[in-house]
Amino acid sequence: MTPFSDQRPNTTALSDADVVSSARACTAAAGHFDELRGSVVAHGPLGTDQGSHLATSSEVERTSLTQTWTQFIENLETRSSTELDRRAASLQRQIRDNGVTYNVYADAEGPQRPWSLGLFPLILEAPAWQRIEEGVQQRMRLLEAVMADVYGPQTFLQQGLLPPALVHGHPGYLRSMAGIKPVGGVHLHVAAFDLARGPDGNWWVLGQRCQAPSGLGYLLENRLAVSRQFPQAFESLRVQRLASTYRALMDSLKASSPAGADAHIALLTPGPYNETYFEHAYLARYLGLSLVEGSDLIVRDERLFLKTLRGLVPVHGLLKRVDDQYLDPLELRPDSTLGVPGLLQAVRAGNVLVANAPGSAFLESPALLGFLPALAQHALGEDLVLPALPTWWCGERSAMEEALERLPEHTIKPTYPGSSIHTSFESVLGPTLKQAALDEWAGRIVRQNEDHTVQAYMPLSQMPTWQSGGKDGAGTMVARSALLRVFAVSDGKDPAGHPRWRVLPGGLARVAGSSADVASMQRGGSSADVWALTDGAVDTTTLLPSALTPAVLAQRKRLVTSRAAENLYWLGRYTERSENTARLARLSLECLGGEDQSSSPLLQWLSQLAVANALVLPGTPSATQARRVFERTLIASLASQEGATSVGYNVRALKMAAATVRERLSQEHWSTIVRAEEELFAHCKLLSARSDYSTAQALRVLKDLSDQLAAITGAQTDRMNRDDGWRLLSIGRHLERLNFLAHALECSFDTGAVHTDGGFEALLSLFDSTITFHAQYQQSRDIAALADLLVLDRDNPRSLAWVAHTLRGRLSKLALSPAGELSSMSLRVPNPDTWDLAQLCESPEGAASAPALRSVLETLRASAYKVSEDISTTYFTHSGKNKQSVGT
């Protein structure tokens, strides 16, 4: 091992200020490498041979900060702890507003919480980064050689360099891929390595991820957020940029795919309920990939296709974020709904590139680390630049016996993490166990030796983090243990035809949430940006192509998958439904406490609409029977998720639909949706917790929600591209509006509410047309005036004629009908041009009122239901003739 020497203490004096004092007082725990000073505190547990690199606690406290950290602090543009508190709050607000989330299983409040990001970056000086880069590239060459051999001649197994039981016994080894060479000749396009800096100052490998490593999207968000907080420090330290590495990955994927530079690459995600779905959508948007789920894809004639509204579109490459065992239910897990039937056959036929090639999961076993040094000598003729911590696979008797002797000082890990056919468990730190627990673990290892791997324990280096102050004081620096995850991505081939890889400069640091030496996001830790410094010029490459040719422009046109189209359609419906139910709830509460609260027709009308729109349960006493009971029930049901699926149910359904198409929404659009849902349920929870809640409080909650829904509607109307997906969203909104308004108007005639002053005004309010009506007709209560504005006015977006006319046009546009022609589906919607005001308002003697108008309203509602069924059949279930190619 080469002694660590790239960080030298700096003797430059810093001004005595809050941040400087805090930095001087921030020291790592005994036995841990201190990133702030570039030295170790006291004596580490790895052996006395490292004594020459160690310092005593008092010496560390007197040691100045490294030159790099000194420069960082000098460029903070502040020396105030209060200002850093403000920046930390701004950072968290930015993360929250951007909707960056992660599934944290240790969070008792629920699985979803905002992504946790620390204020300070982990800074790697140029010499240290160059060594990491060299070591990671070497390990990528070695792992690629292992993949090629294990799925090829298997000489490593025959020569005993790899135990066959460890490889063939791993559930991640796919026998169906044996003898198959991947498209482009590269098995591994993306891999992640978890590194830790030991007390000797060197970086050690703890593990590797090759199936679907997470973090490539989160580190982009980290870089954007943290660099904005410290722009001067970011520039002065010469931090290497990230874009060129991502561009290299995309160029490599396309070059390796069957279609070459014209390849259509998609990112395969498990869906919005996956813990890292945010970064799937983030990466897809950043890299210009189609974000797809397994149900979006289909294999035909050993080729992979994407199901879109316009038919099947070839897919030439998949960047997968789905574990291998779920990729193909025909050959792997039959219960998987995340994969694509027949995908492995398409891979074997050489018609689609999958990154990484299926079958790399066995490389993630910690037991493999112990065999890599000998493999590196055999396959590469080199010693490993980045050593791994000593590792013993207990499947070998001699290794097990040695591991059992070292158990109290080392870490116990599962050989097959996450396996359903082997023993799997959380890693256990031997130094934290009592003797009885150690004896129990020793017994397990003896009984199930192959399932256990023992790895040397090493104290993690500790980096400075900012802990914001509470109400009584300012924040301060605190040292926390950190793990570094670095990423290697394919970078084409060298002139000799050998695969190349590029290491993403920096990476993702995972920081322990407390003084414990466990840095895990799954266990509630946080993250930090990683700044890899360079001595040379900073690369300013972007992902924008140098020339936007017609071919590039055509390729960048977003495809609308059938799944995305369906979710956009329901996003539109639930947005409109949320607006309608919120408006109806407000109107009902206002009328129940207003001047016309004794009007029986009005109360009957409101009661019928409330039941029809699930604001209250059908058995609830109507407002005419028990006005206060009806009012309290309506308020109590606002956030109901069962039975009376009131306003809250629709708002939550709106959020869920939006989550599935998040990559198509702006940050502001998504943030408004999240905020509307969170605030509604929070306020309704407060209402239900108080026995003395008032109608005025409920009205304020609904008013705030209506304002937010108006912003959501505005984002959908003015901020989204007018493609087929948006048309379906708009169609969904107009179908919902047509049915709701037609039913409300019809019901007003049934109950007679329209013939009362209060009912007349309430109807105008529900149609959001009060101001327009009074401006045109003053205080008229004439039914003809009402019908003219609410039914026939083509300039009123809330009139039935406007909705029907717009709906007919959107349906024809979706069907690609020639200009001036209507599609068969649009013809199902009644033509407003055939309506006549006199005929609609005519009331024959003895008739209830306006039977022609009531007939039109019934026809409109029936057409809305029929068009909804036709849309589902034609565009979503693919059972129509024009979509039969998508069937089986």
Image (spheres, grey):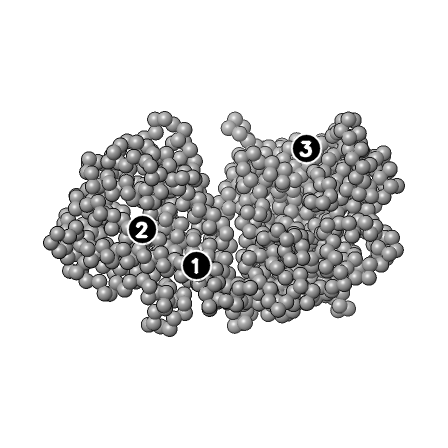
What distance separates the C-alpha of mark 3 from that of mark 1? Answer: 53 Å
- In whole angstroms, how far apart are the C-alphas of marks 2 and 1? 20 Å
> In this orientation, which residue lies closer to the viewer: 845 or 9?
845
**x and y, in percent, of residue 181 in the image:** 74, 64
Element type where label 2 sits in the image: helix
Q: Residues within 10 Å of mark 3 (few under 14, many from 20)?
A: few
Residue plotted at (81% across, 40% down)? 449
Labels 3, 1: front one = 1
The reply to whether dot 3 and dot 2 touch (C-beta < 8 Å) is no
Using a 10 Å C-alpha cutoff, classify the residue at mark 1 as few (fewer than 14 neighbours), some (14 to 19) or many (20 or more). some
In which quadrant of the rendered image does the N terminus lie?
A: top right
Q: Along the polypeptide, which appears first: circle 3 or circle 1?
A: 3
Callout 3 amino acid: Ala
Res 872 label: 1
Q: Read off the residue under disc 2.
A: 740
Which secondary structure, mark 1?
helix
Residue at 23 percent of width and 59 percent of height:
792
Write down the quadrant of residue 860 in the picture.
bottom left
**For the point 77% across and 49% down, which residue is it?**
169
Q: Nearest the camera: 679 or 426?
A: 426
Please report whichever mark, 2 or 1, sits nearer to the chain's N-terminal start: 2
Label 3 sits on residue = 516
Does the rendering let one see residue 212? no
Could you say which is closer to the camera, residue 282 or residue 306? 306
Q: Is residue 108 shown left or right of residue 49?
A: left
Which amino acid lies under the numbered mark 2 shown in the image of this protein?
A: Phe
Where does residue 829 sit, x and y in percent of width and height? 31, 62
